[in-house]
Amino acid sequence: MVSSNTELTYNTKIEGDVVVTQADAVINWIRSNSVWPMPMGLACCAIELMATASSRFDIARFGAEVFRFSPRQADCMIVAGTVTYKMAPHLRRIYDQMAEPKWVIAMGACASSGGMYRSYATLQGVDRIVPVDVYISGCPPRPEALLDALIKLQAKMRTDRSAKRLMTA
């Protein structure tokens, strides 16, 4: 039993500390600031991907330092390097094992368009087997380019309407 009715009434002193927002905005903010990448280092771009996690470039500033080598724990696949037709079904299987929502970054000219390899063995762009959200140009691209792509992906994540889709389904 409450002895005073003043504890149950609206307190105007705490009005400035109350934040009202949509569930989508909160969920997307959390997702965008805790990206768990699945590194698919297939060629020389993988060295630049590894450099991004070093102290000089520090991908941890963007909440993506937890590289996961299990697709069930990752939400962003970074395809770094040349994808061959022999590797393509395995890359697709790993992508399919990732939980929704999931994103893909194509890192480098080879992952984006096949690069300089115009041969029967090289896939001419990873977007033929998985949907790509952000492309990074270069051969190999600098670590700063991957950080820029991560910032663009985070901006895309913040506008996602997946929570609304889940509630209406």
Image: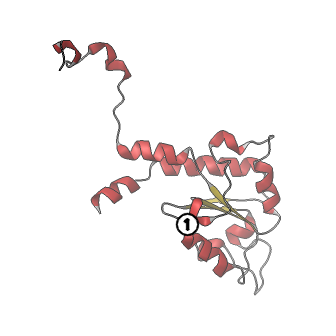
Residue at screen point 77% across, 80% down: 118
Q: Is residue 133 above or below residue 153?
A: below
Q: Is residue 43 visible?
A: yes
| Amino acid carrying mark 1 in the image | Met
Task: Give the image location of residue 104, x and y in percent.
Answer: 60, 62
Q: Is residue 115 above or below residue 46?
A: below
Q: Is residue 132 above or below residue 6?
A: below
Q: Secondary structure at mark 1?
A: loop
Task: Give the image location of residue 8, x and y in percent.
Answer: 20, 19
Task: Give the image location of residue 58, x and y in percent.
Answer: 74, 42
Q: Quadrant of residue 127?
A: bottom right
Task: Give the image location of residue 133, x and y in percent.
Answer: 56, 61
Q: Is residue 139 visible?
A: no
- Residue 6 placement, left or right of 36: left
Residue at screen point 18% across, 12% down: 4
Residue at screen point 67% across, 39% down: 61
Residue ID for mark 1: 98
- Residue 151 placement, left or right of 163: right
